[in-house]
Image: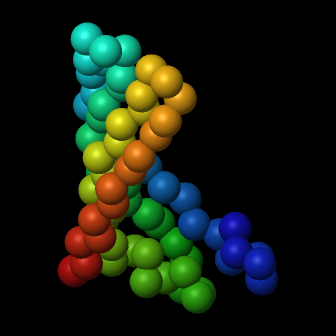
């Protein structure tokens, strides 16, 4: 929800695995659905994510944005 009340929902799909050192790695895609308001540009974006969570509590993510 935005500060002015517009809302969007998202739907994601991904795959993941654990590694021998106790890390978790996954890749996912996220698509958004928004109304005809300020968030409408989200309807034309797909986000692709690579995420790693280390067994030591560290985490890192890389996101790419595909626009149509």
Residue situated in front as seen by the camera: 53 or 16: 53
Corner quadrant of residue 4: bottom right
Q: Percent from the top left, x then y, of residue 19?
A: 26, 17
The answer to whether residue 13 shows anywhere in this view is no
Q: As drawn, which residue projects farthest toward the right?
A: 4
Q: As drawn, which residue projects farthest toward the front?
A: 56
Q: Percent from the top left, x then y, of residue 52?
A: 36, 37
Count how many numbered circles sit on residues in the image: 0
The quadrant in which the C terminus is found is: bottom left
From the viewer's perspective, tell me whether residue 57 is left or right of residue 27.
right
- The residue shown at (25%, 78%) is 67
Residue situated in front as seen by the camera: 55 or 13: 55
Above or below, 6 against 60 in this view is below
From the viewer's perspective, tell me whether residue 2 is left or right of residue 61.
right
From the viewer's perspective, tell me whether residue 42 is left or right of residue 62.
right
Above or below, 36 against 27 in this view is below
- The residue shown at (42%, 32%) is 53
The quadrant in which the N terminus is found is: bottom right
Q: Percent from the top left, x then y, of residue 3?
A: 77, 78
Above or below, 21 against 26 in this view is above
- The residue shown at (46%, 40%) is 59
The way the protein has been coloured in the rendering is rainbow
The answer to whether residue 56 shows anywhere in this view is yes
Residue situated in front as seen by the camera: 17 or 37: 17
């Amino acid at each position: 929800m935005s500060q002015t009340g517009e809302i969007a929902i998202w739907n994601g799909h991904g795959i993941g695995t654990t590694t021998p050192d106790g890390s978790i790695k996954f890749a996912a895609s996220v698509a958004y659905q928004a109304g005809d308001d300020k968030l409408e540009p989200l309807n034309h974006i797909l986000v692709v994510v690579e995420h790693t969570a280390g067994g030591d509590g560290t985490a890192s993510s890389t996101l790419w944005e595909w626009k149509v």
